[in-house]
Image (cartoon, helix red, strand yellow):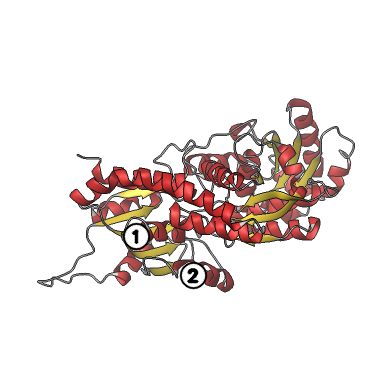
Amino acid sequence: MNKFVDRPRFSCALGGALFTLRALTRAIPIIHASAGCGYNLYTAGNAGAGYLGGGYCGGTGWSSSNVVEREVVFGGSDRLSEQIRSTLELIDGDLFVVVTGCMVEMIGDDIGSVLDEFANEDVPVIAVSTPSFKGNSCDGYDMLLGGLFSDYVRRDAEKRTDTVNLLGLVPGQDAFYKGNLTEIRRLLERLGLRVNTFFGEGETLENLKNASEASLNIVLSDVYGVGAAGVFEKTHGTPYISLPLPVGAVQTSQFLREAADALNLPRDAVERVIKDEEARYYDYLERIADIYNDVDLQRYAVVVGDLNYAPAVSRFVADELGWLPRLAVVTDDLDEGEIRRVEKRFTGWESDVSPLVRFDTDTSSVRRYLQEAWRPGNNERYYDSLSPLFLIGSVFERDLAASLGVPLLTVSFPVTNRIVLNQSYAGYKGGLGLTSDLLSTLIAGR
């Protein structure tokens, strides 16, 4: 019997698909699911993503078939057909995507036959199967993108050696996805590349439609987006590489070198960009050297987050802030192969620090792992306590931080105690932003 998940940090696959579509300009989801699914997923995802909002014709305005008992008994195909027709009449969009919930998948609605009715519409109408029993919100991101890569992206585009696509940052699940994508795109453009992020600033559905021009897909994750990249490779013949989300100068410089090697870019030109970016980065970082040393801002750290953030943030605080991460809890539900890939990200750091790494979806487990990473004092007269300590995680760690009397910075879903706009933790700019947020939290009471 599988154990229950205490306070899950992900929504279902349908939720992941919906927030991925919300991030695509003028893409309109049509939810074919039970009444209430869309609203519940919106309220959870909106707040958890730093108050992302509904976007264009989204949120509480999402189109939904809202199937009830009648459709469960007699089938929901007619209800879906009616909903698609009314949505096309009422909503101005450039792409309409039917995404499905559990109930309609279990009763076996023939979505394909319904879509045949709309084959001659002026705008494309496609469908992607996204029931929750197929995975969580990150799986929904992969499912949705896989469907778009198969059914929407052009198949006759000529490859361009200077063009890449970015995958692996899940809109909403990563509250900082837009700022992160903007920073990574900025850096790759400095290398002379054209970069499609699909969900970044100023991008449209044309970027997605012509994505098959890319000569390489760069997946900023060891798991998220890998399945979609595989579909892309099979459908359009574009290979992919998987690189970790880079936070700060050390990781970002390594990322740029590895991406450049995969694209056979001139190394001297890449090194000039890195030198320029690092000079700017350390010029800003130098500003905090005095206060860092004067009031001793070094800390032990516990990092709780998904497989993108947990290793990246742990390495950042160790390699660049000189902190001592004692515990990292990765909150994804992973198979053994995925665990092995993520574990490798906690090795080979410049600081030669190696935190205790645990994989667990349950929020309540973090306290137990903390005791494993640093044994309690047990009333010993001389005891080296885990102090001063800083906790980096989600709002689910708020109670733990309060009980320990330590500060908390939320960087991983859910992030309900912050408003997230264009903030980024990726790249050089993101490293400066994370440094500012961490140290500002420490001196907030001065």
User: Measured from the top left, where is residue 83 in percent x and y?
Assistant: 76, 35
Residue 233, visible in the rendered structure: yes
User: Measured from the top left, where is residue 219 in percent x and y?
Assistant: 62, 56
Q: Is 274 situated above or below 234?
A: above
What is the crowding at mark 1: few (fewer than 14 residues within 10 Å), some, or many (at least 20)? many
Image position of 408 (left or right of 172): left
Image position of 443 (left or right of 94): left
Image position of 223 (left or right of 391): right
Camera-nearest residue between 324 and 125: 324
**Location of residue 107 by image quarter:** bottom right
Residue shown at 56%/73% (left/top)? 336
Residue shown at 11%/71% (left/top)? 382
Camera-nearest residue between 383 and 86: 383
Q: Is 441 situated above or below 367?
A: above
What is the crowding at mark 2: few (fewer than 14 residues within 10 Å), some, or many (at least 20)? some
Residue shown at 15%/70% (left/top)? 383
Which secondary structure lies at badge 2? helix
Residue 414, visible in the rendered structure: no
Which residue position is annotated with label 2? 343
Which secondary structure lies at badge 1? strand
Please, which residue is most extreme toward the front here?
268
Alpha carbon separation for disc pair 1 and 2: 16 Å
Q: Amino acid at mark 1?
A: Val
Camera-nearest residue between 56 and 83: 56
Q: Amino acid at mark 2?
A: Glu
Q: Quadrant of the N terminus?
A: bottom right
Which residue position is annotated with label 1? 302
Q: Is 358 situated above or below 415?
A: below
Q: Quadrant of the C terminus?
A: top left
User: Measured from the top left, where is residue 242 in percent x and y?
Assistant: 61, 61
Q: Sequence order check: which comes first, mark 1 or mark 2?
A: 1
